[in-house]
Amino acid sequence: MYSQALSYLRSVTDKTPEVGIVLGSGLGSLADRLSDPVFVDYGDIPGFARSTAPGHKGRLVFGTLSGKTVVCMQGRFHYYEGYSMQDIVFPIRVLKLLGIKALIITNAAGGVNTSFSVGDLMLITDHINFLGINPLIGPNAEEFGPRFCDMGKTYTPALRELAKKVASVCGLTLKEGVYIACTGPSYETPAEIRAFRTLGADAVGMSTVPEAITASHCSLPVLAISLITNMAAGVLDQTLSGEEVIEIGNKKAGELQALVKEVVHEL
């Protein structure tokens, strides 16, 4: 199925992307800023699932950003949508086969660290997989990577340093922390958030970790950034909603876009 997806994409565009970018909830507008864009709906690509999450357009966008050829996933797949892990990470392997040399992952996340505020950008330094499943379970895809995948430097140190340098130049404050992934779609309980804080988590979300594991397995450098769109359950006395996530994502997307744009320029 990988070869079918690759053949189809090469039939609709001759662009060879250098960087892949996964755009999270409320953050898809970055893809609209690409020069000379080519849009490809997920439903047309062999092996791709359909994105059902709110705020996810469900298409690949090829184009130029900061002088580099990139491909954006304008929407991703989540475990809570009912997809298998193989469905969720299938696009990451396709992007690898297309020729990307680095993967930038973005997401909307809840702030677990009480020193964070809504609207903060957090550079992911590490993760905790609380999904109860790993995308590498099953027969190993030897063409992509080894049976046992080292995760010590999943979030590539050199890319993290580059992001911090770029943030400083752009006048952006960039927090750093550990991301914990849960299945959703229900938000976490206050007790779970207290437990996650004890475990060392700074932000919580429902994505990113399967993609990062898969990228690490196929030796792709990874940079991951969370936009804190809400404080997690129990931090503030307010009801959590998906609408709030999209709203804050739309309001703060410009800062994340500026950061990603300059990182791509420096790669």
Image (spheres, rainbow, N blue to C red):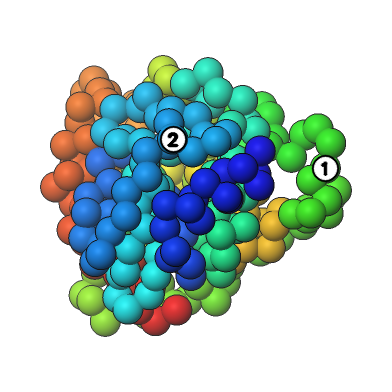
Residue 140 numbered tag: 1
- Residue 70 x %, y %: 40, 64
User: Is residue 177 in sight in this rendering?
Assistant: no
Marks 2,1: beta carbons within 8 A: no
Residue type at mark 2: give it.
Asp
Horizontal side, residue 29 vs residue 263: left or right: left
User: Of tags 2 and 1, which is closer to the observer?
Assistant: 2
- Residue 89 x %, y %: 59, 40
- Residue 15 x %, y %: 43, 65
Q: Nearer the viewer, residue 172 or 154?
A: 154
> Helix, strand or loop at disc 1?
loop
Residue at (74% x, 40% y) in the render: 136
Which image quarter holds the C terminus?
A: bottom left
Residue type at mark 1: give it.
Asn
Name the residue that disc number 2 marks.
44
Residue at (55% x, 76% y) in the render: 158
Q: Quadrant of residue 24?
A: top left
